[in-house]
Image (cartoon, grey):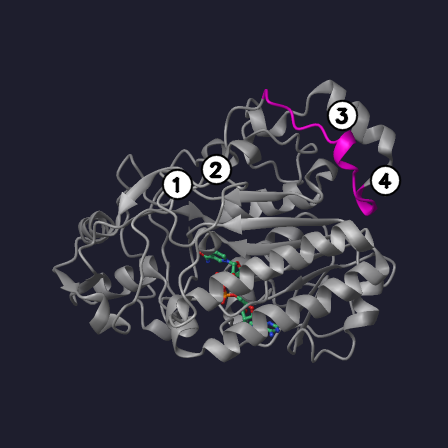
Amino acid sequence: MSTHHASRSIQPILVTGGAGFIGGHLVERLLANGETVVVIDDLSTGSRDNLRAVAAHKNLRVIEATVSGCAELPKIVAGAKAIYHLAAAVGVDLVVKSPLHTLHTNLHETEVILKIAADHGVPLLLTSSSEVYGKSEKAEFSETDDLLIGPPGQSRWGYACSKLVDEFLALAYGRERGLPVVVVRLFNTVGPRQTGRYGMVLPRFIAAAQRNEPVKVFGDGLQSRCFCLVTDTVEALIRLQNCPAARGEVFNIGGAEEISIRELARRVIETLGSKSVIESVPYAEAYAPGFDDMRRRKPNVEKLAATPFAANTSKARVFPRSSPCTKTPARTRKKLRSRGPKASAAPVPASSKRISRKRPKPICSANRPSSAAVPARWCRPDLKCSSKPVTRRRWPTSNVCMN
Ligand SMILES: NC(=O)c1ccc[n+]([C@@H]2O[C@H](COP(=O)([O-])OP(=O)(O)OC[C@H]3O[C@@H](n4cnc5c(N)ncnc54)[C@H](O)[C@@H]3O)[C@@H](O)[C@H]2O)c1
């Protein structure tokens, strides 16, 4: 891992939690875009393996520290072009087993970085979670919905509350201190290198199926989720960070296709040609008596789809030329140009925000790859997954990882 100083002539982008699952993909993408990146990560749930492909990159610097414990944080933030704040205690298992660590990490670390970012006016994107929708039973969740969180006796709601307070904090720093901030609520995100160790469902299923062990489905398995491929998520993160009209706003990011967890298990077994059987495990056995799970968790992504993103964020074009997400209406382009390069450093007053309604497709459906083969490795080596490609078969047409 390169630990030398990134070029001082270029303003780096700071990614906290950059050695995590999503962070690793984000860092790879930013470097591919020609950016200089500084990662701060304490490797509590992340791993250097997540950055292995870019470990020797001359524009990457990795600092192993907590956000609040990083002595250089004020200096790094002062010189940064933008911040992606992903560092958090994540995963149902971790959150249920270590509620204090979860609350401390998600509240304290976020407040520390928000304050320093505000001191220097550095744009910050905060990754929140669909968990904030709590026990709501709506068919689809929208950013302005009322939220229904469970009682504090159940640790899992501490994660939801901590992420929600992070959102309040971020928006308050935006309003009162002029911090250019964007909040995103990520729904289930999946892809290569995700670990099942902290309770993430798809890598857990894949690891079991690869070993022909029972695939354990909690509850009746009829609870449903929507899964989004991490590369789509990363695309949305970068576009929102670079979009002046997104400042001070909250966005859902997630897949739009719902699938029950039992069906997900079935598809994993089928796709991998595994001999595994599905085993039902009561929640009380998997977690603790009284554990609450949500029956559905589907994002409404209309707001994301309607956002006038700045032109292509990548040097390597990822969307087809005809993709609606790469087109910026002429009027918006003119407006973005007229704001000049400094536009991104200042929050846009609500009255001047224009969210075009002419952009119907969510970012995730626009980025569907033409050949969605099952990736060679969807789990980390520490889970003893096979290093060989698991299969050459394609996902069924209704790919669980894409919307
Ligand atoms: N993966 C998902 O489906 C999902 C869903 C909703 C929200 N999110 C959010 O996205 C972000 C990234 O999640 P992920 O799935 O990549 O999880 P992850 O656990 O892989 O990444 C989190 C990273 O933060 C690091 N970290 C934790 N505490 C830290 C601290 N105090 N200082 C520095 N680094 C610290 C961890 O080591 C890890 O590398 C998190 O904020 C999470 O809440 C993820």
Inter-mark Cα distance, 3 to 1:
29 Å
Measuring from the top left, give residue 105's x and y in whole percent.
58, 73
Inter-mark Cα distance, 1 to 2:
7 Å
Inter-mark Cα distance, 4 to 1:
34 Å
Q: Which mark is residue 364?
A: 2
Left or right, 114 with reference to 271: right
Q: Which quarter of the rendering shows the N terminus?
A: bottom right
Measuring from the top left, give residue 366's x and y in whole percent.
49, 31
Q: What residue type is labelled 2?
A: Cys
Mark 2 Cα-neighbour bin, 10 Å: few <14, some 14–19, many ≥20: many
Quarter of image, res 93? bottom left
Considering only order in the chain, which callout, 4 or 3, is on the residue closer to the N terminus?
Answer: 3
Q: Helix, strand or loop at disc 4?
A: helix
Inter-mark Cα distance, 3 to 4:
13 Å
Mark 3 Cα-neighbour bin, 10 Å: few <14, some 14–19, many ≥20: some
Measuring from the top left, give residue 28's x and y in whole percent.
60, 56
Inter-mark Cα distance, 3 to 2:
22 Å
Name the residue: 44% across, 58% down: 149
Residue 84 is at least partly visible in this image: no
Residue range corresponding to the magenta coloring:
344-358
Residue tagged by mark 4? 341
Q: Which mark is residue 333?
A: 3
User: Circles 3 and 4: CB distance less than 8 Å?
Assistant: no
Of residues 68 and 249, which is closer to you in this image? 249
Q: Helix, strand or loop at disc 1?
A: loop
Considering only order in the chain, which callout, 2 or 1, is on the residue closer to the N terminus?
Answer: 2
Measuring from the top left, give residue 217's x and y in whole percent.
21, 60
Q: Helix, strand or loop at disc 2?
A: helix
Of residues 356 and 99, which is closer to you in this image? 99
